[in-house]
Amino acid sequence: MSQVTMVLVGAGLRGMTYARRALATGAGRVVAVAEPDPRRRARAAEEFGVPPERVYADWSEVAAGRLADACVIATQDRLHTEPAVALADLGYHILLEKPMATSEDEATAIADAARRNDILLAVCHVLRYTPYTRLLKRLLDSGRIGGLVSVQHLEPVGWWHHAHSFVRGNWRRQDTSAPMLLTKSCHDIDWLVHLFGRTPRKVASFGGLTHFRPEGAPAGATDRCLDCPLETGCPYSAKRLYLGCLGDPDQEFWPLSAVTDDHTETGVLDALRTGPYGRCVYACDNDVVDHQVVTMEFDSGATCSFTMSAFTPMEQRRTRLLGTHGFIDGDGSTLRLVDFRDGSEETIDTRTSAAGSPGPSPEDGHGGGDEALTDAFLTAVAAGDASLLLSDAAESLATHRVVWAAEQARVTGTVVELDVRDLDVRDDAPTVGRVRSSDGGAARLAPRSSP
């Protein structure tokens, strides 16, 4: 199978993850880089051997003509739409970092561009691609626990991760990024829809910014951790967090590289003294929620509850799936299945491959999802076979619309009803859904508030 040539649009942490996987497997080769930050641009060009005439400061310079088979778009969330539409119009196949876009109109424009140009577009819903998810989906579809009646799902964001990304970091404000349910948890809503094989009929949501506010600051706290007399006893100490990354290559890649490229004690302290990551978590300009609950009801009467919380360890998602004939508990690595019919119980460790060798760790690229998605995308492009992807632009648009409906429900205090169709699961790929209307087109979710 031929090697896929790629343009990397956005050489930050996510873009580099996908590009490095392509390079490591030999399935893809980066032939051009577009990145506004000069240090990131130079680093990516050197790492991937991109010649100077194919290194650009702005994505629009790439759009002068088609340079490759495919592109990775991993710009900031609000900067997805223009490059995605322009590069789709040039015929690029697109691997697009989530969220698809920050508004329904822009996400629709991207989906329309993918359809009219007949290109492959995979939004990076990496949780669909993990061995854990694939096995869980097979168990559900085979009827091992009967009909799925209710699901409880927790996303434990982690206290320090929330402070890093959603209080001090790039995703702290809705006006410069998007609501947290979209930027962080569109993964989870998409994953839950994938498990049910259909979109919900009704959505409600509650939550808010409860703790990371000025009034939450303890007496005597200062605006920066380096000046604060309470720093050593604070769970959100930037000094402890970021100095603690030094010497660990994984932690230096993330989260430390978001703070500074100077991975020395002096470099870290300088960044904390002047940059956003050294601020007190109670003295930032953040406005996204720190906890949220979403409840969904499906046409079948099945229900689902999803909880996102900052006030947890940073762990894998926890899920309990309740069926008519049994239940499954999952922790991102293992699945515990209890069968009501005979009382039997089985525990399956999805970290071990069928051959008995260790599989992906949950801590390694979203449980292997980053790698598996990249592999699937490159194989699909090389083969010209869309069936190798577990979702397309239309389905990603549909699951994003569930997120926007949930956020509308939270803000307005209403139940939002969705005009939806079930996912049309193809006979030749039972774990792959496509959202279709009765005439074969993509179903639109039309939110309308009800008391």
Image (cartoon, rainbow, N blue to C red):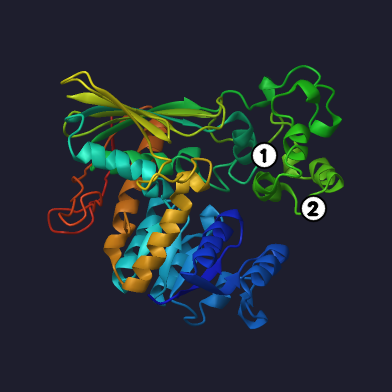
Q: Name which of mark 2 and mark 1 comes first in the sequence.
A: 1
Q: How far across and down, in percent of the image, does residue 9 sit?
A: 55, 66
Locate residue 254 relative to residue 200 in the image: left or right. Answer: right
Numbered label attached to residue 262: 2
Q: Which tag is nearer the camera, tag 2 or tag 1?
A: 2
Q: Residue 352 at x, y = what percent?
A: 41, 42
Q: Nearer the viewer, residue 255 or 22?
A: 22
Q: Are marks 2 and 1 in contact (CB under 8 Å)?
A: no
Q: Residues within 10 Å of mark 2 (few under 14, many from 20)?
A: some
Please report the residue visible at 67 percent of the width from the left and 67 percent of the height from the top. Answer: 41
**Amino acid on which disc 2 is placed:** Asp
Q: Residue at x 41, y 36 (%)?
A: 407
Q: Secondary structure at mark 2?
A: loop
Residue in the picture at 18% in, 28% down: 301
Q: Position of residue 436 (x, y in %)?
A: 19, 54
- Asked if residue 335 can be seen in this view, the reply is yes
Position of 192 relative to 38 (above/below): above
Q: Nearer the viewer, residue 280 or 236?
A: 236
Q: Which residue is mark 1?
A: 168
Alpha carbons under labels 2 and 1: distance apart: 19 Å
The C terminus, quarter of image: top left
Q: Residue at x 42, y 77 (%)?
A: 90
Left or right: 227, with 52 as reference point: right
